[in-house]
Amino acid sequence: MELDGRVVLVTGGTRGVGAGIARAFLRAGARVAVCARRPPDAPVEAAGRPAEFHPVDLREPTAVREFLTAFAERYGRLDALVNNAGGTPYRLLGESAAERHARVVELNLTAPLTVSLAAHPLLKASRGAVVMIGSVSGTRPSPGTAAYGAAKAGLENLARSMAVEWAPEVRVNTLVLGMVETELSHLHYGDEAGIAAVGRTVPLGRLAVPDEIGEAAVFLASGRAAYVSGASLLVHGGGERPAFLDAATADAATAAAGTADTAAADAAGVTTADKESRDGSV
């Protein structure tokens, strides 16, 4: 397969998006290690093989460095690092002290930097790749998750700088994610009806699934992206329909006038084709 013989580490790879990324790399033939504070409820598997779990708290720099030292001894190489671990509860800025918000920044920005620095010697030796898992929250206002959005904005900038400093041996890119349906989606969007309603706000008509994020990560880590570094790849289903389009009344008035005009023409026995010809439209 495409990544046979390669070793990949996915942080936070035990559930949700991280598990989807791990499965995609397993399907591509890689040997996959995942790390998190707690083991998964069930092994993360694909293509008849499991990802190998390692416990570590990524917010503890000493523990991270010890983990990567042991990782080098166990695996002998590292070809791709996917900095996926992160997340945040919904919390308005004024509802918590700065220290609580700082912990969110620590997990979503400082931890990926810590892991990347510890992994750099292995990645440099293999001429490997780093994939940061960013978010559209870092590109727009993020009320209720402001610290998370700020951290993701910083992560994307960090990746660009890292791509310059570590070139040409290590490529660094960011996947900028929109909404993804995971086992925790109900906490953000409600029941199945709520998730479906949120999905309809996306141009592609649904939320992403974790394995789709994984396929994009495999691309950025593979030889198919050999000349892609310092890039941000949007994986958001087309983004969000601008709210002003639904709030504006100009199009609604035009549409209403057109409907009334057509109804009057029908009442007068004028066909649509006759009307368009008369108006010079055809």
Image (cartoon, rainbow, N blue to C red):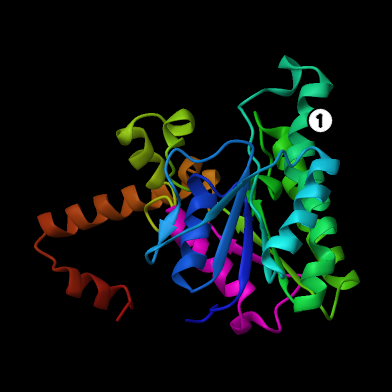
Label 1 packing within 10 angstroms: few (<14), some (14-19), many (20+):
some
Specify whether 113 is left or right of 238: right
Q: Identify the residue at horizontal 37%, vertical 64% (top origin).
A: 48
Can I make out residue 175 in this image? yes
Q: Position of residue 113 (x, y in %)?
A: 82, 52
Q: Say above or below: 136 vs 161.
A: above
User: How far from the left and from the top, in percent, is residue 116?
Assistant: 79, 57
**Which residue is label 1 attached to?**
102
Please say whether residue 132 is one of the residues in the magenta stretch. no
Q: Secondary structure at mark 1?
A: helix
Farthest right residue in view? 165
Res. 175 image quadrant: bottom right
Residue for point 39% across, 52% down: 254
Give, as a three-letter code, the residue at label 1.
Ala
Q: Bounds of the magenta span?
A: 209-237
Q: Say which of 271 and 51 sits in front.
A: 51
Decide which of 130, 275 is in the foreground and name it: 130
